[in-house]
Image (cartoon, rainbow, N blue to C red):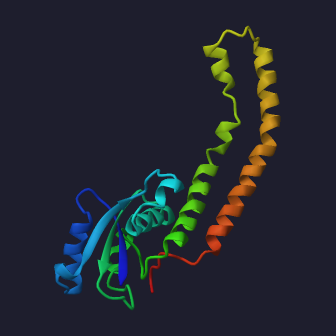
Amino acid sequence: MTYAVFKFHRNCNADEWIKRLSIQLLTPESKLHGFDAWEADIKIRGMTAKPTEVLAGNLVCSETKEHTISIVKFPKVLSTDKHLMIFGNEYLGCFTKVLKKNEMLSRIELFEKLNNNESLIDHFEANINSIITGYKFGLTAAEIEELKILQAAYLKPIEKWIKLRRKTLEKSIEQMPKFLLRGF
């Protein structure tokens, strides 16, 4: 089986893609099945109980950085996707097998860590401007500037660590075999 992945649009969901592909590939609509998937902000703990189709959809969204996609399932393995390339950028690629649940969870977990890595600095950074406007601490402008300088010095090693962590996560993702193939 091959699963073809397309960008989702309000007027072009999985059912519409099935109609288009049926005409393009001269295949009865009844032989094609599809579903729409979206990138959900679901923590990895809640993902283990999800069906594999939901996990595959989430994984594709993570890899393509699309928030919503349509997946069409073909009854057989496609040897090439040249007939799908006519859809241009709307066609994102194919995968020929659904990975095992634990493989998908590992991939999704890496993408989730990478996504969360960018907001990690927010947990260490105090919003000094809110201290100025929201609270009456009696700080002078010079004291506020001094606090900002201290905070910047304190955050530099944390920012460096976050960048190194991002590089490590990106390297781990790059080392995984591609789940979604295009132009085969």
As rendered, which of 177 and 80 lies closer to the eye? 177
| Residue 53 placement: quadrant | bottom left
Q: Is residue 55 above or below residue 27?
A: above
Query: Is 114 positioned to the left or the right of 125 in the image?
Result: left
Q: Name the residue: 43% across, 53% down.
A: 40
Q: Name the residue: 41% across, 56% down.
A: 67
Q: Name the residue: 47% across, 65% down.
A: 59
Q: Position of residue 3 (x, y in %)?
A: 36, 77
As rendered, which of 63 and 34 lies closer to the eye? 34
Q: Is residue 2 above or below residue 122?
A: below
Q: Position of residue 33 (x, y in %)?
A: 25, 75
| Residue 156 placement: quadrant | top right
Query: Is 139 positioned to the left or the right of 96 in the image?
Result: right
Query: Is 130 positioned to the left or the right of 5 in the image?
Result: right
In the image as oriented, which residue stretches furthest toward the bottom? 79
| Residue 84 placement: quadrant | bottom left
Number of labelled discs?
0
Q: Quadrant of the N terminus?
A: bottom left
Q: Position of residue 132 (x, y in %)?
A: 67, 16
Q: Is residue 136 above or below residue 74?
A: above
As rendered, which of 41 and 4 lies closer to the eye? 41
Q: Name the residue: 71% across, 62% down.
A: 168
Q: Quadrant of the C terminus?
A: bottom left
Q: Position of residue 143 (x, y in %)?
A: 80, 16
Q: Is residue 98 above or below residue 115?
A: below
Query: Is 162 positioned to the left or the right of 16 in the image?
Result: right
